[in-house]
Amino acid sequence: MTRSISTTFIIFAVLLLAACEADRMSEKGFSLPPGNAMSGREAFVYMHCHECHTVVGEELPALTGTAPPFVELGGKVTRVKTYGELVTSIINPSHKLARGYPLEVITNDGQSRMPVYNGYMTVQELIDIVAFLQPHYDVFVPQYNYRIYP
């Protein structure tokens, strides 16, 4: 009987630990402090993000020697660009590539052409850039014309 209880306890402990292990990479509980959009705009320009990106509704300083196509940020989208998606796009640019652009324009061997700034950008600059970009996205519901059959 004691052996049965010990075996049951060990199995329960192993299952409990396995369940904890699966959640170690969860974003639950992760939250960055609020950013400053004006500082984010300054960081965006300072990091030369506007060499490759335009931001809808923003007049950014002109750069010489750069030619389109630029990857446009902001504008009308059919779903919310979450805080987490914007952070991920900045710190891991190859995670999800921009749609609507020829692959040879936005990739090198399947990886994003956007440099990884993780070793150069401060956390404060990151959260400020996200605070700058997020309000530029305008979510709308697309209109569909469905054919009605008699």
Image (cartoon, rainbow, N blue to C red):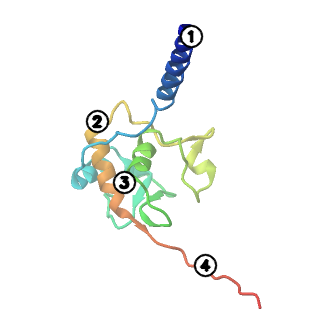
Q: Residue furthest bottom?
A: 150
- Residue topped by disc 4: 144
> Which is nearer the N-term, disc 4 or disc 1?
1
Query: What residue lies at 54% left-to-right and 74% top-to-bottom?
Result: 142
Depth order, front residue of 63/4: 4
Depth order, front residue of 84/7: 7
- Residue topped by disc 1: 1
Pick the quarter of the image with the C terminus.
bottom right
Question: Residue 122's x, y, as percent?
Answer: 28, 36
Cα separation between marks 4 and 1: 67 Å
Label 3 residue SS: loop
> Which is nearer the N-term, disc 4 or disc 3?
3
Cα separation between marks 3 and 2: 24 Å
Give the label, 3 or 1, closer to the camera.
1
Label 4 residue SS: loop
- Residue topped by disc 3: 63
Residue type indicated by callout 3: Leu
Cα separation between marks 4 and 3: 40 Å
> Which is nearer the N-term, disc 3 or disc 1?
1
Question: Residue 144's x, y, as percent?
Answer: 60, 78
- Residue topped by disc 2: 122
Cα separation between marks 3 and 1: 79 Å
Give the label, 3 or 2, closer to the camera.
2
Depth order, front residue of 2/135: 2
